[in-house]
């Protein structure tokens, strides 16, 4: 098990969300990655959670202890596009 | 077995608003949700409380009343749901649209709402990044934006533990009726509850819950796709939409439309978020419950977006997502007791108006349950208007 991340550590760099804010979301009722995301914005930024998702999963696992399984913690729903792409490309006639 | 005055099924915006208003009235309430709060339609949408997407008359009055309630709620609820009365702008691409829009705006003005026609110069002052070749539009400073899922959290957090018990990841397996067909309890996969009243706030899943008791609730999932931009400087300052949107929403407003857009009911909408992204929409079509974002629809939405905000061309899209809205054929929600099953209430089927109508819906259901005079005439929302409302 990875070590404890202090409350003031930035976990989601894109949206500047700390471990403490993620723990607060879990106290509010979040039990999975998506629940944390909606309550804190962690994972809503430019990288769409590609950087912080593993850390959010780790914090969920530590806070929820035996109540959580990898399946219940889950992951952020994979969505198009795979990486940021301009609206110009998405709306191009050559698609 | 715990006992409650009312059990609300569904933790979307309608269920959470009902729960909040019932607790405020003094009822002991349980909210049962099969996933998390706001995990369905209420977090897969955009959100605005508007007058200018309503038809003059009762519809507009409802829109106006909702905005006033949001203003009050933004002060009453401790959890910030990013309510922002920033206004909204509709833009017209053709002279024909301007003409229809003028008639519409005059009708709203005659009813006393603050909305006005704006010319292309005024539009460029309101939204500098808008395309320069548009013919005109209309603007209202009464409309507002908000964060839909934060609104759900705000309703819940305010009363949780103070009259409201929340049961997440709990699936309703049956609503128990006695020999007189009155509600006497709710069974779930985590245990049973005793109650005399239940409200089915299942949205697109309301039919599934209704089926447990032989009800045929005619709500269909109608999908909408939204594209989310990277966070940037301000692109727009309020909700901006093409007037053609009115055509997709009310088929009785006549305007010529490009057939390519009609295929997926694509209409341009753009909304800023509190995180400095913009949400670009929209589409509406019936494809069941699947939340896939088809590339053809993404393509049409992006193209339509660039037509009105050319700056989007070089901005990045970070996510495409879709939600299903609870559609009812006559475009009116079902907000009613099931007469044949005393204590069984339905509040669902708001389609794209669920967020904006949530405060008034929660209040109306509370008034219905308390046996008080309702703020609005509930006749149009009765379940008994549905012809085949029981399964064979």
Image (cartoon, coloured by chain):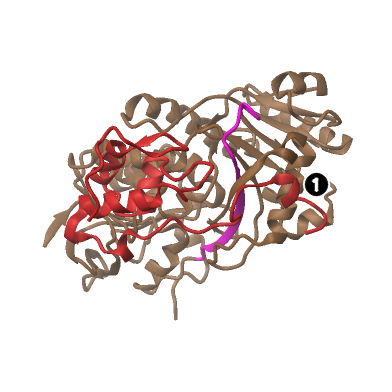
Residue B328 within the magenta-colored segment of the rendering: no
Residue at 61%, 67% in the rendered image: B287
Q: Please state the total of marks drawn on the protein image.
A: 1
Q: Position of residue B169 (x, y in %)?
A: 29, 60
Q: Left of A26 or right of it: where is B44?
A: right
Residue appearing at x 51%, y 66% in the figure: B218
Q: Chain of mark 1?
A: B
B70 or B385, which is in the foreground? B70
Task: Identify the residue at image location x=19%, y=46%.
Answer: B28
| Any part of residue B267 in sight | no
Which residue lies at the image location 36% right of the left edge and 24% below the top edge?
A: B75
Circle 1 residues within 10 Å: few <14, some 14–19, many ≥20? few
- As drawn, A92 above or below B275: below
Q: Is residue B16 visible?
A: yes
* Closer to the camera in the image, A88 or B148: A88
Q: Quadrant of residue B291?
A: bottom right
Task: Please state the extent of the stretch shown in magenta in the rendering.
Answer: B218-237
Q: Colour of chain A?
A: red
Quadrant where the image shows the C terminus of chain B: bottom left
Q: Is residue A21 left or right of residue B391?
A: left
Classify mark 1: helix, strand or loop: loop
Left or right: residue B1 compared with residue B338: left
Please give the residue where the numbered disc 1 appears in the rendered image. Answer: B254
> What color does chain B have in the rendering?
brown
């Amino acid at each position: 098990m990875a070590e404890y991340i202090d409350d003031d550590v930035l976990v989601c760099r894109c949206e500047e969300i700390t471990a403490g804010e993620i723990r607060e979301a879990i106290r509010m009722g979040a039990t999975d990655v998506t629940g944390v995301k909606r309550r804190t914005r962690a994972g809503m930024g430019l990288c769409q959670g590609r950087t912080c998702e593993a850390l959010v999963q780790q914090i969920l696992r530590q806070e929820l202890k035996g109540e959580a399984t990898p399946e219940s913690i889950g992951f952020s729903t994979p969505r198009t596009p795979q990486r940021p792409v301009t609206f110009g490309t998405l709306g191009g006639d050559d698609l | 077995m715990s006992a409650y005055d009312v059990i609300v099924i569904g933790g979307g915006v309608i269920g959470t608003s009902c729960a909040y208003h019932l607790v405020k009235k003094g009822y002991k309430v349980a909210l049962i949700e099969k996933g998390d709060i706001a995990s369905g339609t209420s977090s897969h949408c955009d959100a605005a409380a508007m007058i200018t997407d309503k038809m003059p008359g009762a519809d507009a009055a409802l829109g106006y009343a909702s905005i006033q309630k949001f203003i009050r709620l933004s002060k009453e609820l401790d959890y910030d749901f990013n309510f922002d009365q920033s206004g909204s702008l509709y833009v017209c691409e053709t002279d024909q649209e301007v003409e229809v829009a003028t008639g519409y705006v005059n009708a709203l003005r005659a009813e006393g709402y603050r909305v006005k026609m704006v010319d292309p110069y005024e539009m460029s002052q309101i939204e500098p990044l808008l395309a320069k070749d548009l013919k005109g539009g209309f603007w209202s400073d009464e409309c507002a934006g908000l964060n839909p899922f934060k609104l759900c959290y705000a309703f819940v957090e305010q009363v949780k533990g103070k009259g409201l018990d929340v049961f997440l990841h709990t699936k309703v397996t049956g609503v128990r009726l006695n020999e007189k067909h009155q509600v006497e309890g709710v069974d779930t996969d985590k245990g049973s509850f005793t109650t005399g009243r239940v409200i089915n706030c299942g949205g697109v899943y309301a039919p599934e819950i209704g089926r447990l008791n032989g009800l045929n609730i005619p709500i269909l999932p109608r999908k909408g796709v939204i594209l989310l931009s990277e966070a940037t400087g301000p692109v727009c300052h309020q909700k901006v939409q093409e007037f053609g949107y009115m055509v997709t929403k009310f088929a009785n407003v006549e305007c010529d439309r490009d057939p390519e857009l009609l295929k997926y009911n694509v209409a341009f909408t753009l909304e800023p978020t509190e995180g400095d992204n913009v949400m670009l929409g929209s589409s509406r079509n019936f494809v069941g419950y699947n939340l896939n974002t088809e590339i053809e629809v993404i393509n049409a939405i992006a193209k339509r977006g660039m037509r009105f905000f050319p700056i989007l061309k070089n901005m990045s899209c970070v996510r495409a997502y879709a939600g299903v809205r609870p559609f009812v054929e006559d475009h009116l929600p079902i907000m009613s007791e099931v007469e044949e099953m005393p204590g069984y209430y339905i509040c669902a089927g708001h389609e794209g108006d669920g967020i904006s109508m949530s405060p008034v819906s929660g209040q109306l259901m509370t008034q219905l349950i308390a046996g008080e005079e309702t703020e609005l005439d509930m006749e149009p929302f009765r379940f008994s208007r549905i012809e085949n409302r029981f399964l064979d």
